[in-house]
Amino acid sequence: QVQLVESGGGLVQAGGSLRLSCTASVPIFRIYHMGWYRQAPGKQRELVATVTSGSNTNYADSVKGRFTISSDNAKNTVYLQMNNLKPEDTAVYFCTSRVVNSIGYTDYWGQGTQVTVSS
């Protein structure tokens, strides 16, 4: 079982920045990958960015060049630095982790943190 605690959401004007944090209850080097998804009202949850235990990153096209995902193994924490925010980035952001196990893998989710970008 992996528990994920997110923080850092809030209200910001377009062009501004926010940093989200996600702290895991287990050492993250044991986790295959961690990442962020988001869900806007009336829309499906979508990938934002992921980082593997080997530090390989993946980003949605809509956030490339603006968002950066990073990890701090000593703090069991993954960060999402969001710059040049746009109103269309408004959503609930969820932290996720994928743990490889005997049945394949299990995905865990945080409770979500609201990000609102005003125009």
Image: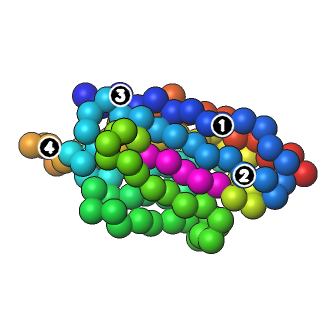
**Comes first in the chain, label 4 or label 1:** 1
| Disc 3 residue type (three-letter) | Gln
Kindly report which numbered mark, 2 or 3, lies closer to the viewer in this rendering: 2
**Which residue does the numbered mark 3 point to in the structure image?**
3
| Disc 1 residue type (three-letter) | Gly
Q: Secondary structure at mark 2?
A: loop
Q: Residue furthest left?
A: 102
**Comes first in the chain, label 2 or label 3:** 3
Relative to 65, does residue 18 appear above or below in the rendering? Answer: above
Q: Which residues are magenta?
A: 78-82
**Which residue does the numbered mark 4 point to in the structure image?**
101
Res 40 seen here: no
Label 2: how many residues lie within 10 Å, few (<14), some (14-19) or many (20+)?
some
**Which residue does the numbered mark 2 point to in the structure image?**
17
Label 3: how many residues lie within 10 Å, few (<14), some (14-19) or many (20+)?
some
In the foreground, 70 or 106: 70
Q: Is residue 15 magenta?
A: no
The percent coordinates of residue 91 (x first, y second) are 68, 43
